[in-house]
Amino acid sequence: MDAVEELQAIEEIKRLKARYCRLVDLNRRDDLRDLFTEDIVYEFQGWRKGRGADSFAGSAEDFADRRSFHRVSMPDIEVLSETTASGVWAMVDIIEYPAATGKQGSRGYGWYHEEYRKVDGGWKISSLLLVRHRSEELGARNTQG
């Protein structure tokens, strides 16, 4: 793989991650599924882990009654071969809880650790580990109209 091909792979993986964040925030489970290999292994440290694209997309249902805002930055992507790569992304997410909980939401800070595989000409996420280093509650919901 020459330098141009490597840079192209890195840019394609950056776009993949941008789509991931957007589709999670829009709760578009069917579209989200297409971003993963069939055998993806995933873990949201301390919360959920699983295997398989259907399982991952289904886990988004846990957020059906919540709104989320994901931001990732500082991608450290290493292309390992023509069909494999790995990456680490800094992340911040804000989760707004349903009004019935009485809580406003939470803000989390951490890192995504991922592996990617090129399948049928396109990059997909084959492994995802989200490690939160800090999480803070946003406070009580204002119930005063």
Image (spheres, rainbow, N blue to C red):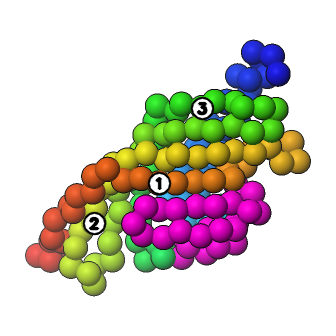
Residue 48's x, y, as percent?
Answer: 48, 70
Tell whether position 11 is magenta. no
The amino acid beneath tag 2 is Gly
Could you say which is closer to the camera, residue 28 or residue 84?
84
- Taking the magenta stretch, the answer to whether it contains residue 37 is yes
Which picture quadrant has residue 4?
Answer: top right
| Disc 2 and disc 1 in contact, CB within 8 angstroms | no
Q: Is residue 11 above or below residue 92?
A: above
Q: Which residue lies at the image location 27% right of the left edge and 66% below the top edge?
A: 105
Residue under the image location 64 percent in, 45 percent down: 115
Quadrant housing residue 9: top right
Tell me which residue sits at (37%, 47%) in the image: 110
Residue type marked 3: Ile
Say which of marks 3 and 2 sits in front: 3
| Residue at x 11%, y 76% (from the top left corner) | 144
Q: Report the disc number at residue 77.
A: 3
Identify the residue position indicated by label 1 in the image.
130
Q: CA distance from mark 2 to mark 1?
A: 19 Å
Sequence-wise, which precedes: disc 1 or disc 3? 3
Q: Secondary structure at mark 2?
A: strand
Mark 2 Cα-neighbour bin, 10 Å: few <14, some 14–19, many ≥20? many
The vertical placement of 13 against 97, above or below, is: above
Which residue of the protein is positioned furthest toward the bottom in this rendering? 100
Q: Which mark is residue 105?
A: 2
Q: Looking at the image, tell me whether mark 2 or mark 1 is earlier in sequence order.
A: 2
The mark nearer the N terminus, 3 or 2, is 3
Q: CA distance from mark 3 to mark 2?
A: 31 Å
